Amino acid sequence: MNKKLTAILLALLMLLPAALTACSQGTENATPDADASNPAQTQTTPGAEEAVEAEPERLYADVPADSNFGGDDFNILCSSNAEYGTVKNDFHAEEITGEAINDARFNRNATVGDQLNVKIVDIEANVGSGEGQNLITQDVKSGTGAYDLAFCCGYATSSLSTNNYLYNIKNVPYINLEAPWWDQVANRDLQILDQLFYTTGDISTADNDATYCIMFNKGLIINYNLQNPYELVDGDQWTMDNFINMATQVHQDTNGNGQVDREDLFGVMIWDDSMMGIVNCTGTKCCTVNSEGLLELTLNNETVIEAVTKFLDFAIQKDIADAYQRTNWDDTWLVTKFSANETLFLMQLIQIVPKMREMENDFGILPYFKYVESQKEYYTTIGSWHSVFMCIPNNGTDLTRTGIVTECLANEGLYGLTDAYYEKTLVGKTTRDQESAAMLDIIFANRVYDMGWYFQIGGYNEAIMNELRNYRNEFASMYKKAEKVANKTLQKTNDAFLKALEEAGG
């Protein structure tokens, strides 16, 4: 098990009840826990100088042991945005194939299905946030109860939540949001007025795919005699200034035509959505939940202005930075370019990493840099367009059954799906070094869920990307232009959550 999961489990073992109940077993027939006070059960090999660290105890979902749903279908709607034309579906697995993630999905579905006497059925919507949103809207309005659970992108879940089409997950029986199989940062950051309408965790790997990262070419680091980025991260010196300094040293007119074009060697290939990551890497969000539990616009502050301005000064230099989407939106070109040693850095999503599996040259993975060295953490964004969140349609389905099945799926995901994604696929097959695994731990532990992007407040997510797209650096005018609309949208959003709280009797 990776260090991140180990740390989480060890910490939560001190907080959770010692005997959580398995989906398939009640307290009355559970295997007794080992008695930590019994020397015979903690004894190490005679003569050993150090005790062997024990594997964390296997935790289980705390649901009724006699849960039985008569073999009925449990329908999961899967919808997402994806430029690769594929819906993010963490539940489709028809048979064991030997592929780690597929087999983990199959085994999880089968285990939960057998334990609860329920059939896990995945229903794919067409690619695009609108399709899943429309299906849920129609289902709730008609009261057909077609979907027990759903997964949609942040744009869709945000809109659905303000229109009373989703349940407050905090009120769903048997979903224990404090359990380690739920993302505690998401649970915290996605609440408005103590209401949580969508979240994520080990029930899905889509949130991992949608996480920003920076990849670097090890050969070019050596060729240009640059600092080791891993050492910079470890020394809390992986900053925007150091990133820019390294990238500006790398450029070559590869084809010798005296012009800057896509054939050249660049310091960085920049993805449009990176601009939202620049805001969040400062530790700031477009919108933040304030002390009253309401969304507040926090984009326009001195730190963000300085960071965005500095980054754009660098990023619009066409001989150093290749804003590759100006000429090619498909990922084929950037994979080819990075694999061929023709860019030092690549700013993209974790989902691009497995596409580098066949790359002959060595590469590494990094979190987004700090704006200044004094920041506490390296903050990395969950992409708004690429995000996929779990939600429960407000369509009159059996909430108790939904809660039990969902909790068991998430629990099994921690011990199977997450391990298959992280250890056996991302780290085990794709990355090339031990340091990348440590970097992924940092990335996944310090992710940013920014509801300003998900609710598209003021259209600032597009507006800030347009600065890069149009090779501009005009933050002040960009902000001012959308400020009035942003405040109206913000008020409307907060009013919707206030109304939902009032109707719930809060």
Image (tube, rainbow, N blue to C red):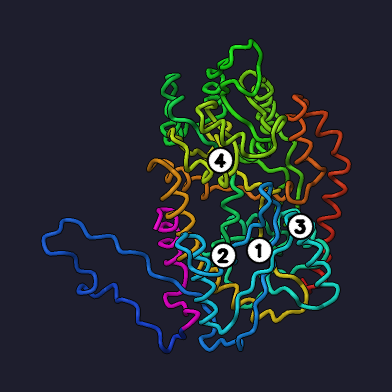
Quadrant of the drawing holding the C terminus: bottom right
Callouts 4 and 3 close, C-beta under 8 Å: no
- Rounded to the nearest whole Å, what is the CA distance between mark 4 and mark 3? 24 Å
Disc 4 residue type (three-letter)? Cys
Assign a secondary structure to mark 1.
strand
Residue that label 3 marks: 156
As drawn, the label of residue 203 is 2
| 393 sits to left or right of 444 | right
Indicate whether 307 appears above or below 421.
above
Disc 1 residue type (three-letter)? Met
Span colored in magenta: 1-24
- Of callouts 4 and 3, which one flags the residue occurring earlier in the amino acid sequence? 3
Disc 3 residue type (three-letter)? Ala
Indicate whether 383 appears above or below 14.
above
- Rounded to the nearest whole Å, what is the CA distance between mark 1 and mark 3? 11 Å
| Residue furthest out toward the left | 47
Callouts 3 and 2 close, C-beta under 8 Å: no
In the rendered image, residue 341 lying in the magenta stretch gets the answer no
Q: Residue at x 45, y 66 (%)?
A: 415
User: Residue 157 location, x and y as percent?
Assistant: 74, 59
Q: Residue at x 73, y 79 (%)?
A: 397
User: Residue 481 location, x and y as percent?
Assistant: 86, 34
Quadrant of the drawing holding the N terminus: bottom left
- For label 2, the crowd category at 10 Å Cα-Cα, with few meaning under 14, some 14 to 19 and many 20 or more, is many
Comparing 381 with 497, the one in front is 381
Comparing 127 with 442, the one in front is 127
Residue that label 4 marks: 213
Residue that label 1 marks: 390
Assign a secondary structure to mark 2.
loop
User: Residue 209 location, x and y as percent?
Assistant: 58, 50
Disc 2 residue type (three-letter)? Ile
As drawn, the label of residue 276 is none
